[in-house]
Amino acid sequence: MTRRPLGTLLALLIGSALGCSAVTPPAPSASATPGGDYPAPTVAPSPTRPSSSVDDRKPRDRPPVPAAPDLPGAYRFISAPDFLNQDVADLTADGRKPHVVKQTGEVANSTNRDYETALDRVISEMASHGTRDVLVAGDLVEGRWGRDDSKAGVFGPVRTESQRMRAWRRAADVYYPAYRQRFADHGLRTYPAVGDHEVGDDPWRTRRPNAWIDFKRRHVPEFKKIFAEHMLTRADGRPRFTDRPRSGPARRTAYAVRLDADVLLVTLDVFERRGGDVHLSVDAQQLKWFKGVLRQARKDDVPWVMVQGHTPMTRDVRHRNSSQLSYEKGRRSDLWKAMVEGGVDVYLSGEVHDQTVLQRDGILQVSHGSLLYRGEASYVVGQVSADRLVLENHQFRGVVGFEDRLWTTSRQGAPGHISYPRPSIVTGTLEASRTRDGGVRLDATGGVFTPRR
């Protein structure tokens, strides 16, 4: 889940009055989310871990480090969880009826020229690294659909549950294709996982009755089906990936695919509706399938097995504007045990909008991601050969203007102006190699990819 500030802060109003057209984003308010679902948590620093210069700085303020070495002939990929974590699409395109927001008198829209330019620059840079593959461990969209806080009527009425569900589908029919097309326009293909935003954004349960949250919780299976229809289905209606659970709630959203002769990617759905709530866990059928995938990978002697899921396995990672969702039971979970016993090398996760590397039980957990709308876009470039792995974190320093906002279904949209005038810088590197006994040895690390102890 993403945390955004409530209301326009005084400093931003002052900046606007002085004629400043762009400012860097402030720290978020801890008072509430834009949807008003519940207050953001207050997290105290760990008494057992002293802060470091990396931890004390925001992602965009961290210094550059020397670039990682190039591996000639290696398979390359991009990993960009939480990209976009926002609804961005032209609501006036394709002959759609324009809708006016009564409070402002402006036509409701979820993009503008600034956003299109910024997105083009960021995705173009991703494409420049010589790969077609972009891994996205969840939170492609904001996904608070089935509501209409501005009462603009863009996706229809939302007074009843059936109306909410129709509005959800209409929003998905706009935002998911726009997301997919942006990457296709740059010759890139995405390998997405379900994040909390794809199933309505947490929470899914509150102490007091709440029609919106009750709606989200009840319709999680439908949300996943819609996500799969748009992001994991071919034009002819067949699933993009054949290796997936044959039954259970993740049969449409979990999958395994051989990205390269040296790399197997397993994408997990870590959101399970169980016991009247949504849990951060994999269901029994998915876990059984996953163990089978790992057994087959060992038989096939796959050099590198990577797994992606939206949430980190532990909360002991850096975080930025996040509610810090983490996998239930973490390293004590059956999932983690399966990864250790099954020979998983790398676990890629998002959710926290910052970067942390942990090495536990022989597995590298790389928690990463960012928020483009805060001027902090980032991505990881991976290089893999039969016996070596190289990761490099690229961090942008964008400029954001809060003097107006894009329209979204929830009551506070993203800042109306954003630019990325300069290329990214490298803020973290990691070099690893395969040991004789099949383990993973860290040979060199730097910056934000220096592992936490």
Image (cartoon, rainbow, N blue to C red):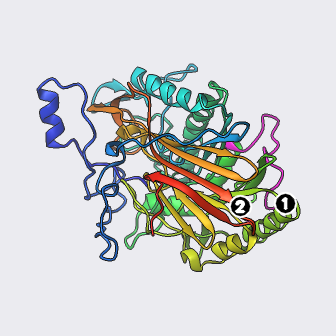
Is residue 179 something that shows in the picture? yes
Residue furthest to the right: 299
Find the magenta span and give its range. 230-248
On residue 301, the disc is 1
Q: Nearer the viewer, residue 443 or 166?
A: 443
The residue positioned 41% from the left and 23% from the top of the image is 112
State which tag comes first along the sequence, 1 or 2: 2
Residue 449 pos. (x, y %): 48, 54
Tell which of 177 and 347 is nearer to you. 347
Return the residue at label 2. Answer: 250
For badge 2, the amino acid type reads Ala
Residue 160 place in picture, x, y as percent:
50, 52
Location of residue 385 with respect to 180 vertically, above or below: below
* SS label for mark 1: loop
**Magenta region, mostly helix, strand or loop?**
loop
Can residue 91 be seen at all in this image of the molecule?
no
Task: Give the number of the disc on residue 192.
Answer: none
Q: Amino acid at mark 1?
A: Asp
Identify which residue is drawn at 63% across, 70% down.
Answer: 362
The residue shown at (61%, 77%) is 333
* Residue 119 percent location from the top left of the image: 48, 29
